Image: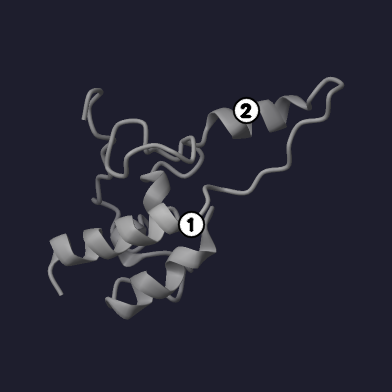
Amino acid sequence: MTFRSISLVLCVLALGAASCSKEAPSPDKPAPEQTQAKAAHAPADVKPGSHEDWCGEHAVPESQCTRCNSDLIPAFKATGDWCAEHGLPESQCLKCNPDLKIVRPPKGS
């Protein structure tokens, strides 16, 4: 399967799946880590592959972040893009691929 096909499958899955599930902050003061975690994730309605589609917590596109959305894992496994040792896509595994560069798209994309 080509990279474009993989991207299409992931985009379709991302559109159908919710973003990272985080508890809503309490009406009182939210804990600082809750505020930081929420800011680190893309809103659910962003365009996959855009600058805004970014998981700041894991430094990968939010629409492809298996650590935030485990529903994406079967698609990566089905395409052979899975590192079982580290529990994330091989295309995101910096331990197996230390020279790997995952770059956030520029603004306006």
Residue 60 horizontal side relative to residue 17, left or right: left
> Residue 86: image x %, image y %?
47, 67
Front residue of 52/66: it is 52
Q: Amino acid at mark 2?
A: Gln
Q: Amino acid at mark 1?
A: Ala
Secondary structure type for disc 1: loop
Q: Is residue 51 above or below residue 1?
A: above
Which image quadrant for residue 13?
bottom left
Residue under label 2, please give it: 36
**Residue at (27, 76) in percent of width and height:** 79
> Residue 7: image x %, image y %?
23, 59
The residues tagged by marks 2 and 1 sit, at their Cα atoms, a distance apart of 22 Å
**Residue at (25, 45) in percent of width and height:** 101
Residue under label 1, please give it: 17
Verify CB contact (< 8 Å) between mark 2 and mark 1. Answer: no
Can you see residue 83?
no
Which image quadrant for residue 23?
top right
**Residue at (39, 38) in percent of width and height:** 54
Indicate which disc, 2 or 1, sits on the residue closer to the N terminus. Answer: 1
Secondary structure type for disc 2: helix
**Residue at (63, 49) in percent of width and height:** 21
